[in-house]
Amino acid sequence: MDKKDKKQRKAEAERLYVEELMKRPAGVFCIRNKQNGKVFIHSSDDITSKMNRFKKSLESNGIFPNKALQEEYNTLGEEAFEFEILEEVRREEDEIAYAMDENFTEIQKRVRKKAKDLEEKWLENLQPYGDRGYHRKKSKRQLTNRRKDSAETVLDVEPNNSEHLYFSLKDLSEVFWNASIEEMKAGFVKHDGKYICLVCGKCFDENVIYPKGNVFYNAKKAIEEHILDAHGSMIEVLLNMDKKYTGLSQIQTDLVTDFYQGLDDEAVAKKAGIAKSTVRNHRFRLKEKQKQAKVFLALMSLVDEKQNEDDKIIAIHKTPRMLDERYAISQGHQKEVMEKFIKPDGTLLQLPKKEKDKIIILFHFASLFEYNKKYKEIEVNQVIKSIYDDFVTVRRYLIEYGFMERTKDCSLYWVV
């Protein structure tokens, strides 16, 4: 197959995917407990895929976004629940995409917002709280008070088209690895008047009021809502990190998930198909690991206080393909390599041959991209070419070393 045929087949596959996606309903659906009538409401720009993912998560006893629903599903079984589409979003003529071009993402964002607004309407109508549903009642401040506070402190309401600032890969790596345990549990840190999501780097300015449906949130509440909506929960995020960071085997990861869900030893043993005494032994080992980690953190904190800045090891990205001695990079060595290979005009002299030096330069390349943003291949090439001509080699290295991921058809790239 020549390049022309391959390109045509790729374009046709993308077109068929978009055509199929446009046929799928967007809007609001619910999961209903047929025995007690309680409901869980959610919205999506692709209801079909979202409901399938939720079904699989419930069936596999994964970390479902709603703990109470997962617990009742485990107890009552699949037959006690049904999925129902409550209302679909009507796509306007200009909200139908025909190709995966620059309009596709913007169109889906608009439809997703429509679906989210419908979700707020259904939450208001059905009031699925307490005995009526699985949602938690959100505390609302009176809109009049919000406006009053806004006037007194000269705050602005976030504009509709604002996605706000995202940290670079380098900045987010430093923020993540320097976060305290409490900050990691919460999923965000506060720095220079901004609340920063540790997962995706999105920032919320404390001088901005953030609307969500008919509710207005300050920055702290807005980032808490963002983490729930975008990432589910921090337990899910942390457990999904590579085991070289969690230090947990697969069975320990499964057990921690069960413990987090509040299951007792007998229930965990039955679910895992192991003896109750084995579960207790695992609890004991995990507790010992926790104590060791506390002592180790205290020791390293004392060491850091006495360490020369140039000797400190830099914070690397969270997804290296292979974590080894190549990543033992001091801040001093990083400065030396950057001065050696980056010219005064910001362009790259050449790619280093030494692996450790190459990683430093690749880290610099990855930091040129916005975190949590999808790029087309041509956009990736343009960013790389702004400082180095051989964009093909650099792009391949960014993937190979785990700085970036891409879709199977290589149409979209993003830093991780």
Image: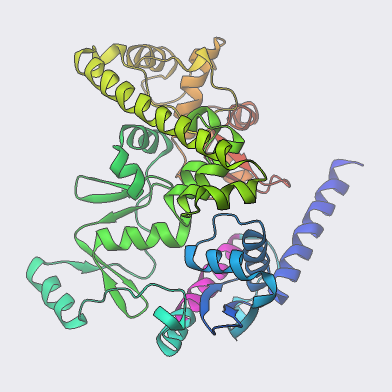
Image-quadrant location for residue 385 = top right
Left or right: 29 in relation to 166: right
Residues 278 and 125: in front is 278
Report the label total: 0
What residue is shown at x 40% (from left), y 40% (from top)? Answer: 168
What residue is shown at x 43% (from left), y 37% (from top)? Answer: 169
Quadrant in which the N terminus appears: top right
Residues 415 and 351: in front is 415
Left or right: 372 in relation to 308: right
Instruction: Specify the color scheme.
Output: rainbow
The stretch of residues the image draws in magenta is: 102-117
What residue is shown at x 63% (from left), y 28% (from top)? Answer: 400
Image-quadrant location for residue 403 = top right
Residues 56 and 358: in front is 56
Q: Residue 254, how many percent across, how many down?
A: 57, 43
Q: Residue 222, how many percent across, how many down?
A: 31, 63
What residue is shown at x 23% (from left), y 11% (from top)? Answer: 308
Q: Is residue 171 above or below residue 131?
A: above
Q: Is residue 381 above or below residue 346?
A: below
Q: Residue 104, how many percent across, how many down?
A: 61, 65
Residue lying furthest bottom in this view? 125
Q: Is residue 67 above or below residue 366?
A: below
User: Is residue 317 among the parts visible in the rendering?
Assistant: no
Residue lying furthest right in this view? 1
User: Is residue 172 among the parts visible in the rendering?
Assistant: yes
Left or right: 184 in relation to 108: left
Q: Residue 170, how many percent across, how many down?
A: 40, 33
Q: Is residue 268 magenta?
A: no
Q: Is residue 108 magenta?
A: yes
Q: Main secondary structure of the magenta part?
A: helix
Residues 300 and 268: in front is 268
